[in-house]
Structure formats: C-alpha cells, structure tokens
Amino acid sequence: MARKKNKYPLIEELEIIDVAAEGKSIGKYKEMVVFVPMTIPGDIVNVQVTNKRKSFMEGYVTEYVKLSPDRCAPLCLHYGTCGGCKWQNMPYTKQLEYKQKQVSDQLSRIGKLELPQVNDILGSEKTEYYRNKLEFTFSNKRWMTKEGIATEAKIDNPKALGFHIPGMFDKILNIDHCWLQDEPSNRIRLSVHKFCITNEYGYYDARQHEGYMRNIIIRTSTTGEVMVIVVFGYENVQKQEALLEHIKNSFPEITSLMYVINEKKNDTIGDLDIKLYSGNDHIYEKMEGLRFKIGPKSFYQTNSGQAYRLYSVTRDFAGLQGDEIVYDLYTGTGTIANFVARKSSRVIGVEYVPEAIEDAKNNSKINGIANTDFYAGDMKDILTEEFITEHGKPDVIILDPPRAGIHNDVAETILNASPEKIVYVSCNPATQARDAALLGRDYKITKVQPVDMFPHTHHVENVILMERK
C-alpha cells in the first residue's frame, strides 16, 4: 500500500526573521507567516508544514540548513523535550532584547496606544536556579525520546517523576536535573523517585485515574527554609509514613513537610486539606525588612529577587507621599499592599481567593502594619460604587490581575472612581494592552517598565503608569 502523501508543503531554506508568541519564531513564505518552534532569528531551516490557515502556517524543522550566529548551546539535558526554557538556545542579552520588543509591539499594536520611551528591561541577576517553587508529576508511563527509544531495547523502568510534555496531559518526561530551582530541589526529587521505585510504589495513571503517587511540590525561600508537599492518590498510612519519614530523615534542611490525599481526577489541591507531617505549616520570605508568611496554598512570585524589583517599580510609579488611599486590586496574599502600606494613608486589598486574603491579613499583622484592609470576592461584584463610597475614593489604583486581565465592568468602575494614577502590573502584555486601551478613555500611559521574571522563556512582566488626562 502506497504511503499517504503529506497534504502540506515542505518549505526549504526558510529564513527565521523574528520571535513570536509561546516561544516560537517566525519566517515568511509567499507572503504568509510561518510559525516554527526550536528556532531563533538568523536560522535558515527546512520546515514541514503541519497546519495551514488563511494567513499563517505552522510547522517543525526537518533540517537546520544554517544556524544563526546568535545561537548558543542549551545548558539543560532536557532542552527541546520538556517544553520549558525554550529560549535556552539564545544568549540572555538577546532574550531581553526580544522581550522588550514584545512589550512595545503589543502595547502599540494591540492597544494602539501612544507610548512614552519604554525603559530598558530589568534583567534577572540569576538566570539559573531562580525559581522558588516547582511541581513535579508522577506517571506510570514515562515519555520516551526518539534517542531513548533507539538506545533502549527494553524499557526496564516505565515510571517517571518530572514535567508534562507540552500538549499532552498524560505524558511525563522523567527529569534528571532541572536548572530552575536550587538545591535541595533536585536531590529531593531524585531521592523520592528512587525510594518509590525501590519500594514498588504505584505511580499515577492520568488516563485511568488510578495510582498512589501523584505529585510533589518543593518551595524554597531566600531565608533558607524549604517546604515539601507530597500528593498521594489515596490513603495508605503505612506507605505514606514510610516515604515521609524517609524524606524527613534524608533532608534535615526541610522546615515544612506536608502531605495531601487527592482522590479527584484533577491535580488541583487548593480545595483539599493539606496535613502537616513535620516542622512548620509555612515558610517565610523576606523583602526590604518585611516578612511574608507562605503556606502550602499561598501565591508568591516565583522569582524572589525579581519580585522585589517588580514591587519597587510599582511603588515608585505610584509616587506615594504618605497621604493617599490606595486600592490594590487582585492583591493575592497582599504582598504589594503591604509593600506600599508604609508610604500610604490606607490600602484596600481585594482578591477572589479567601485563603489568600487570610494570608494578606496575617502578613500585615506579622509586620505590624495597621493601615490595610482586605476583602475577598469576585472583583466585578465587590468593586462597586457603594464599596468606593464606603471605603473612600482611591488616589491610586494598583492592578495585578491574572493573565486574562481585567473584566470590562472592573475597567468601567475604575474609570468612574477616577483615581489620579493607575499602576498596572501584568504578566501578559497583550491583555494589558487591551485593558489599557479601555482605560485610555480618561488616562494616558506615562511610564513603561518591563521586568524579566523568567529567564530562558518568552514570558515577560510589565508595569505601566497611567495618569489621568
């Protein structure tokens, strides 16, 4: 039987000319944009097209005809397979250059906004081991690379503890060494993996929704504290105590060892009871003399060093003199609210997650901050004209929403509240641009500051200052 002919073309000697979203790069072929992963500007490649639309195509590299002079060797053994750190093949100076360009392009192209001079991006001092939190997944069917299949006649150990393969919820790549989080992260993961294999612990099957070992979460802090949370698929006191005791005895530097039983079909643990096995039920992070308590469900920026720079920019843009009422919307655990409180008359924090609001209140208490108030609920329901009348008209509003940005109703309420300044912190310049266009009815952008929180990825944080026209 003849092999079915590929209905999409093979493009030869495509020049990669720019970067695009999701870590891909782009070339031009017959006036069409071609998105190609694993490439950087300057590469010349042969590309097999896998998806064709009216104005663009997508494909993968079949041959690197000529490598870009800007290329560098990725430092990670798992580069190109695990899906993270897609820009490891690009020097960090070039990464920053493209992130800065991304911010400018999206604000001007999507938002069609008039911009001031965009400040030079603040690069991360640490480009390796910069994360303070990682989550690893257990699987009874590890992902095999083509090289691995070629060299292993028989798969002796089908189990994996590592990261999801992009776009595949049930495929896990076993990780030997990850460059994202400092020790003892790698040692803990490898030790747990070895113990579970030696003692024949069952690993989770995401398709069948069965298996004992599900996830392990490791959090570290600049204070030297370490939190480990082990997620089991069902209750087995003997097995869980054996593993937890092994972790406790092997790693005395762990200050918080916890576990949770997750019998659901999804991996989220925010709605589950997390139990303490040994140590404290929290760790602390420090920033400019402030202490922030971090529990197992708490959100905290995953690059601690850059978080301080991000919040410093936010406070500087707010230009607080000490007599302002500040609304910190999407306050999370109140990190920004508490960070700016000492230069404000009063700070009102609003957040959807009730547990986060409790963390925010505790963080104020820990630091002796008495001029903050925090409220939990859906932003568009809480932030009403009645709420503003009750708590005072804001002089400054700080926004730090999730990637999806803010709701139209929230934007309208902000416009009606008419603060002198809006400081918008975003992890997604595209939705920030869209929202800034809505707010642009009454406000203009006067400052723009990109901050790189995630080296070797296409992600970039951005802060804009909007002042009333």
Image (cartoon, grey):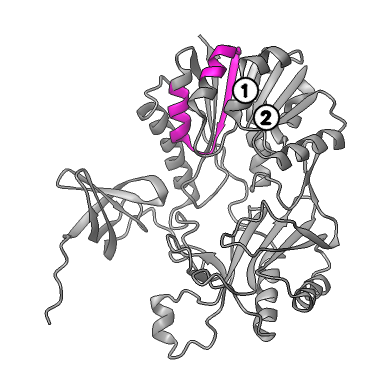
Indicate which disc, 1 or 2, sits on the residue closer to the N terminus. Answer: 2
In the depicted view, which residue is nearer to us: 398 or 81? 398
Q: Position of residue 278 (x, y in %)?
A: 85, 64
The residue where tag 1 is placed is: 383
Identified by mark 2, the residue type is: Val
Apparent side of residue 236 relative to residue 207 in the rendered image (left or right): right
Query: Mark 1 packing: few (<14 Cα in 10 Å), some, or many (20+)?
Result: some
Residue drawn at (64%, 18%) of the image: 396
Residue at x 70%, y 55% (from the top left corner) = 272
> Element at badge 1?
loop
Dot 2: within a 10 Å radius of its alpha carbon, few (fewer than 14), some, or many (20 or more) residues?
A: many
For the view shown, which residue lies furthest in the bottom direction? 153
Outermost residue toward the top? 469
Q: Nearer the viewer, residue 453 or 365?
A: 365
The mark found on residue 350 in the picture is 2
Q: Is residue 198 above or below residue 332?
A: below
